[in-house]
Amino acid sequence: MTLLQLLALAAGVPASGIVRLIEQAKYLNPDLAPLADEWLGKLNAAVDQSNLVDVASKLPAEIANIAGGRLSPRDSPSGAI
Amino acid sequence: MRDRRESRAGWDLVLGVVAICLLVLAPMAQAAGSNDVVKVYAGVNGVWFDDDAAPSDFELGVHGRASLSEHLSVVGSTWYGLEGSYFLGEVGPRVTVTDVDDTAFSIGLGIQWRASSDPTRRPEELAYDAALGWRPFPNKWKQFVVGARGLYGVESNQLEVRAAGRWEIWSGFAAGGAQ
């Protein structure tokens, strides 16, 4: 399995589950609608095939850096979830 | 009996993978600087296995992540289900697919290996993983993160969705690499 295939599979059903949860929260609390719409827009852009191809193309170089002991951490909040 | 043995073997594997990650990471990291590779969070999850509005269960536990590069992390966690009285462990790689320099919002995709003490509901298997994280107060309470996560079991074909709250309780192993 290539990295792109892995990302595409993870972007399929699991991401649609998050979409469903956000839409349910929006339905239960209409005050959350602007934030929910912003999240849904970013989520759809993130799992778009062209974005996944772009990210997957950067991973081999990053894996080589990790293997060489050159770590470059980021503070992405999704890492906490 | 067989399920219990498989579950025990699964737990041993989760703990082994976490221990190996720490043993590999520790020598690679330097004990200085602010760009910490490893962070540990205490957390709570609301879990849905179905389309009901109310969560199927609530979980308390600990989550850790090792950010190794701009996009690539290893995440792992262990949870206790309050309603179902089960333990659950997960570990696997995660790729950030949004702006890596945005510390307030990001989305990650990956694959997790998981095992639980209740294999009928959470079988031992690989699961495709999508996570959305948001810091509602990025300046005042940077330690606080909320989010949502979807997991889809490769063998069980079971979709599970979680709403999550996290509080950072420890960070360390600052990297010396380029930012």
Image (cartoon, grey):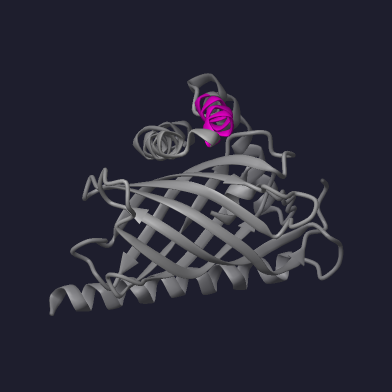
Foreground of the two, B139 or B111: B139
Q: Can you tell which quarter of the image residue B58 is in?
A: bottom left
Task: Report the residue at 62% width, 68% height from top.
Answer: B24
Task: Report the residue at 41% width, 57% height from top.
Answer: B46
Residue occupying the far left of the picture = B1
Look at the picture and state if B145 lies above or below A58.
below
Look at the picture and state if B40 lies above or below B176.
below
Residue A35 among magenta residues: yes
Q: Position of residue A79 (x, y in %)?
A: 59, 52
Residue B66 among magenta residues: no
Tell me which segment is drawn in magenta.
Answer: A32-44
Total labels drawn: 0
Quadrant of the image for the N terminus of chain B? bottom left
Q: Is residue A50 left or right of residue B99?
A: left
Task: Report the residue at 23% width, 49% height from top.
Answer: B155
Q: Can you tell which quarter of the image residue B55 is in?
A: bottom left
